[in-house]
């Protein structure tokens, strides 16, 4: 574990090698999200529990996406990583993109599955949702918008979540020159295909693969193909 802002952040390292492979899970996930994959990879595999998930402690005050990128950077420094590859899912892609664009990290290959961070369409619907929220808040001061999972979050984590989703990573993604593989499911409602295509355009050296009949967890729903595509890409065969 490492300490960040007086809280403990859990991570594990398995395997050996000069080249490291970093796994960044999605929101609500943990080390277990990619552990099955790490066990098959011939690298120095580094898996992190993003706070407050897994065995990491909840922040004392709200984090921003920059905090999560700093946490990852601190772990890489502690592990003295020089040559790095990254596999990330959803929220983890936000962190990876910020990390690569802002820090002096030598990332050879980047694999993003269901990467989040692109601002959604339907601006009109978004405006109506805000109006509805304001009206309901006036009627009931205890009203809380969002999913049931969001409502269960503490105040600190609600603010953290808000900080994260309100940062558009587009301007950071276009700074990336790392060779990148994008893998999305055609049935993904959380990070739809139009987001994948936009990210594909923003990241200059990127390739997009779409899995049919898969949703937001395409890397699990089509695990065998994801393993094949990942290993092929890391070996430089596509």
Image (cartoon, rainbow, N blue to C red):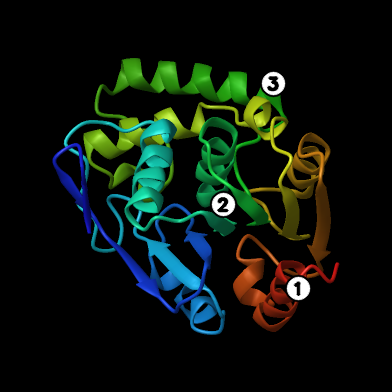
Contact, mark 3 vs mark 2 (Cβ under 8 Å): no
Report which residue position mark 2 lands on: 90
Hey, which quadrant is residue 84 in on the image?
bottom right
Q: Residue 229 carries which label?
A: 1
Left or right: residue 29 versus residue 170 is left
* Eye-nearest disc, 3 or 2: 2
Residue 230 versus residue 163 in the image, above or below: below
Q: Residue 180 carries which label?
A: none
Assign the C terminus to one quadrant of the image. Answer: bottom right
Badge 2: residue crowd in 10 Å (few <14, some 14–19, many ≥20): many
Residue 12: horizontal and vertical position, in percent? Answer: 33, 68
Q: Which of marks 3 and 1 is in front?
A: 1
Q: 149 left or right of 167?
A: left
Counting other residues with Cα less than 10 Å from the Cα at mark 3, is it few (<14), some (14-19), or many (20 or more)? Answer: few
Identity of the residue drawn at 27% across and 51% down = 52
Report which residue position mark 3 lands on. 124
* Side (left or right) of 173 relative to 15: right
Between 139 and 9, the one lying in front of the other is 9
Asked where in the image residue 219 lies, by quadrant, the reply is bottom right
List x then y, in percent, for residue 38: 50, 76
SS type, badge 3: helix
User: How far, Cα to Cα, is label 2 from label 1?
Assistant: 18 Å
User: Which of the marked residues, 2 or 1, is nearer the chain's N terminus?
Assistant: 2
Q: Give me the residue at 30% from left, 57% from top.
A: 53
CA separation in Å, label 3 and label 1: 38 Å
**Percent x, y for residue 27?**
44, 52
Across the whole image, how many numbered discs are drawn on residues? 3
**Secondary structure beneath label 1:** helix
């Amino acid at each position: 574990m490492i300490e960040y802002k007086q809280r403990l952040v859990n991570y594990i390292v398995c395997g050996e090698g000069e080249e490291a492979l970093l796994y960044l899970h999605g929101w609500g996930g943990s080390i277990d999200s990619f552990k099955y994959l790490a066990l098959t990879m011939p690298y120095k595999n580094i898996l992190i529990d993003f706070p407050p998930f897994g065995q990491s402690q909840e922040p004392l005050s709200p984090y921003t996406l920059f905090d999560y990128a700093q946490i990852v950077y601190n772990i890489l420094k502690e592990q003295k990583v020089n040559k790095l590859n990254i596999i990330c899912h959803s929220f983890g892609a936000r962190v990876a993109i910020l990390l690569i664009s802002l820090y002096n990290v030598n990332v050879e290959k980047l694999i993003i599955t269901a990467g989040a961070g692109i601002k959604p369409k339907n601006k009109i619907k978004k405006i109506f949702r805000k109006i509805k929220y304001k009206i309901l808040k006036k009627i009931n001061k205890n009203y809380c918008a969002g999913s049931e999972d969001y409502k269960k979050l503490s105040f600190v984590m609600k603010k953290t979540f808000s900080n994260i989703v309100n940062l558009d990573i587009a301007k950071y993604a276009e700074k990336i020159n790392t060779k990148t593989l994008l893998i999305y499911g055609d049935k993904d409602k959380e990070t739809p295909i139009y987001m994948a295509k936009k990210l594909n355009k923003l990241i200059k050296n990127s390739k997009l693969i779409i899995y049919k009949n898969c949703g937001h967890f395409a890397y699990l729903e089509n695990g065998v193909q994801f393993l094949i595509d990942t290993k092929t890409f890391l070996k430089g065969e596509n």
